Image (cartoon, rainbow, N blue to C red):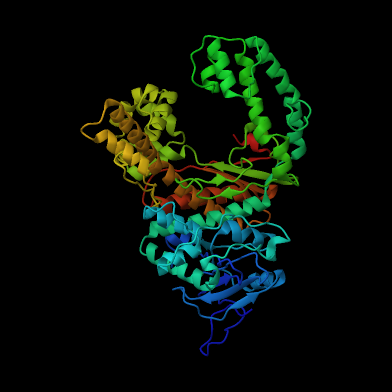
Amino acid sequence: MTCAPSDGDGGPAGGKLPTGRPRLLLVGNFGNVPGRVIRDRDPRRDQTGAVGGIGEDGPVLCALAPSGAGWVARALDDAGTPTGPVTVLPDRAALQEFAASTAPGVRWLWDATTSVYPPLLAAGIRVDRVHDVTLTERILLGRESRHAEPSAAAAVYARRHGLPVPDDPVAEVAPAVEPGLFMAEPSAPSRPEADWDPLDVLAEAFRSQAERSAGENALRLLIAAESASALAAAEMGAAGLPLRASVHDRQLTDLLGARPPAGVRPPKLAQLAAGITEAFGYPVNPDSAVDLRSAFQRAGFDISTTRSWVIKDLDHPAVPEVLEYKELSRLFTANGWNWLDEWVRGDRFHAEYLPGGVVTGRWAARGGGGLQIPKLARRAVLAEPGHVFVAADAAQLEPRVLAAISGDPALLAVSADEDLYTALADDGFGGDRAHAKVAMLGAMYGATTGESGRLLPVLRRRYPVAMATVEQAAHRGEQGGVVRSVLGRTSPPPSASWRATVLAGSLPDAGRGEQARAREVARAWGRFTRNFVVQGSAADWAAVWLSGVRREIAAVPGAELVFFQHDELLVHVPAGSADVVAELVVGAADEAKRLVFPGSPVSTPVRPVVVECYADAK
């Protein structure tokens, strides 16, 4: 291959990038869609190097587009300047040879992992480190209060040159299997960026982002962790979560009866629907919240919602069947036979995960309920023969994060206990763990009324620094300001309509209704910013933890990350390697604490358990 730094005469220096100081490698396409960018760094250097990031020894840029021309690649130096000729990768074999020829520790740079990496995985190519331009740009735009602006490489390039900014591509997920790897792209309307050199676009985007994050180690760590998380997400989606379809099918049949034809209720739901109609004395459609609410209102119950927590206390013969119908209907709709058909292939559940899909940094999923696997479905999540799951989560992460970001000495002392809520209870709530938990969650989520509000003064007395931290964040939100997570992810500003409502309520001639509405929306936004600083910082820690786990288990044959949710992960591993992986998971958690909360004595305990069935993990 010729994608290597050039020698003194400008010719290729060899087919492999050098191992001593790898350079930046660009890979783009010749089609009419701009190339994609990403790149990364050495995991064990400084704070930003722990998971890879911008600005350390040159990365590799790799752009992929579904074009008949395949890919192109190019070496760059640490500043993003080309140092070698363009390498054309016209087919799958060339791509595989190119990937195999790159030296260990090379850094990759592309536009969006969601579209670039799945075809690489389908070709049997796994990359170690990456810098995702799109995810990075979302973080940087957020810091500039420009959350909704396009974030793909072409948009970064356009803004840098004062050109019209193109919209982001509508579809971000490329086909994960053949024949889409090098399939020609369908004809599309002409776009201004179609004529831009994709390698120039990638290099310019990289330089822009490197400049805007320069000197901010915490931000660079966040960018690196976000990019590494995107790799993990694509790998998890491709590998799939082991889920025995026959076991889940049997559970569905036991609970719902035989699988019905399309558009027909399963036998059990039909039976419950008939019982509900009989209890009310006239036909009621339990699938209609309006019908149910009207039926209960006609029976003398003044309710505004039919949520289970409201109707469970009503004294009416229909209540037990309504509650059971709701539970089974959710199962049938969200995780029934259609779900099995669409999302489970070869006894693996293949979800599409979206790192940073929530503004706080938490993951989202596109279809399939990838982050909402109910307890029943977990019974079918069974390790393959000879394998087990190492399941781990961070115990009571968010209150521990509050202790770390606030530096409250009393809360830090409490966080050293394995069960933080029990320690809280012993410290200020007379040993009542339930009250301690309700109070702490209320403080972080802004519950100032009811039981949480009654208990809040205890927290203010015992942990004044921690309470001041979240209350200042809430006040900033109520004033229309923004807040940041510990690594620098920034909350979005409130909308124009929010500002108009608050302004209308503050005018001298504002009526009582306008004043009340203004207070209501201001406090609601304050609850959001109050929680953002905690939940966002917890997501920062979790991303660094996940990145470390992914890096460490790469050396364990057969180990694969198969699930991640907020602060919980599953590693599918040969049974003989379970103890090793459990130690690596704990070590990665300790490393994440040192990187995200340097110098803090806060405890972030992770408790791995080895199980054959996911449902047995808790």
The percent coordinates of residue 4 (x first, y second) are 57, 79
Decide which of 124, 437 is in the foreground and name it.
124
Q: Indicate the quadrant where residue 617 lies.
A: top right
Residue depicted at 46% across the width and 46% down the height = 539
Answer left or right for 393 relative to 271. Answer: left
Is 482 drawn above or below residue 312 in the view shown? Answer: below
Decide which of 18, 98 is in the foreground and name it.
98
Answer left or right for 228 relative to 421. Answer: right
The percent coordinates of residue 449 (x first, y second) are 36, 24
Number of on-image labels: 0
Residue depicted at 70% across the width and 69% down the height = 92
Answer left or right for 295 relative to 450. Answer: right
The C terminus appears in which quarter of the rendering? top right
The N terminus appears in which quarter of the rendering? bottom right
Q: Indicate the quadrant where residue 517 lies.
A: top left
Residue depicted at 52% across the width and 67% down the height = 193
Residue farthest along the left direction in this orientation: 508
Answer left or right for 174 relative to 305. Answer: right
Residue farthest along the front direction in this orientation: 189
The answer, for residue 232, to whether it is visible in the render is: yes
Decide which of 277, 207 is in the foreground and name it.
277
The percent coordinates of residue 22 (x first, y second) are 52, 74
The answer, for residue 56, to whether it is visible in the render is: no
The percent coordinates of residue 374 (x first, y second) are 62, 34
Residue farthest along the bottom direction in this orientation: 9
